[in-house]
Image (cartoon, rainbow, N blue to C red):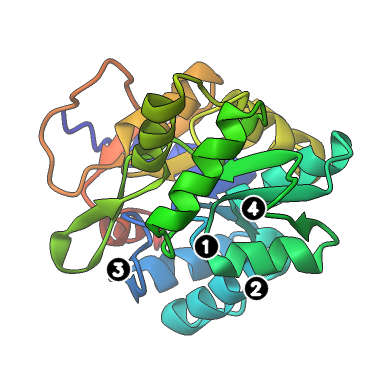
Amino acid sequence: MAYKDRKRIMELVASKDLFLLDGDGTLYLWDKAYNGSNLFIKKLKELKKNFIILSNNDSQSKENRLKLLSKELGIKFEENQLLLPNDIIEDFMLKKHIKRFDGLISEDLKKELSKKGFIADIKRPEIIIIGFDVDLNYKKLIRVITHINNGVKFILTHSDPLCPYKNKQEIPDAGLMVNMVSEATKKTPSNKFGKPYKSTINYIIKKYGCNRGNMLIIGDRINTDIKMAVENDISSIWITGGKRTNPVNYYPTESVSSIGELYNIIKMM
């Protein structure tokens, strides 16, 4: 389903003010930028377009992720140009007056939450957070399951089962981790965040003062990036990565094979 109407793509880019750019699989793969990513972002800046790298990857603190992306893409990013599940769960916990947490999350995210004034408490948590835990161990898993069985609610940072990784591999992500927890406890998360959930778009609208009609979502995953676009009535460009078919019934406004191809289409604007 290759659309690739060059004129329509240029019109889309010209008419939108806020670009929601997927990270892993679109701009970069784990810690390596794709060809054209740097040029595409620089072109957006030249066109005076606002953008947010909107990633479901909460395996790192936001501070460390920004450092990595700035290095790999050769661009200094502002704090508000990267949005992670980290930001949204912090906002949720503040609004709910939740201080003490435990969960299946990385040590880096745990440290970030602690710096923000939340308290890591493995004995009496008020909430359990299930995320992309790159420091997972069995002892932690049993502890979290015990808390949930004892009545502590749990939330999910995002639902991706797999994360794109080096050498075209995919590795277990939060979606698989929550499946283990749900199977063991026979319970489901009280709240889910990240893409494709509406809570993420609502957070962006409130924080960045924009509306859906001025947004353009660019990403490689039909079931997160494009689904979020369709369900929120937002225009989108699917980065196909060479795929020729759409496996689910969420259809993008336009599609291109790569971020490099998208840059080549708009570079003369």
Query: Which element is circle 1 on?
Result: loop
Q: Are marks 3 and 1 in contact (CB under 8 Å)?
A: no
Q: Is residue 141 visible?
A: yes
Q: Position of residue 10 (x, y in %)?
A: 42, 44
Query: Which element is circle 3 on?
Result: loop
Q: Nearer the viewer, mark 1 or mark 2?
A: 1
Residue in view at x 32 percent, y 57 percent? 259
Q: Nearer the viewer, mark 3 or mark 1?
A: 1
Tell me the CA gap for discs 3 and 2: 22 Å
Q: Earlier in the sequence, mark 2 or mark 4?
A: 2
| Residue picked out by circle 2 | 63
Query: Which element is circle 4 on?
Result: helix
Query: Which element is circle 2 on?
Result: helix
Q: Earlier in the sequence, mark 3 or mark 4?
A: 3
Tell me the CA gap for discs 3 and 4: 24 Å
Tell me the CA gap for discs 1 and 4: 11 Å
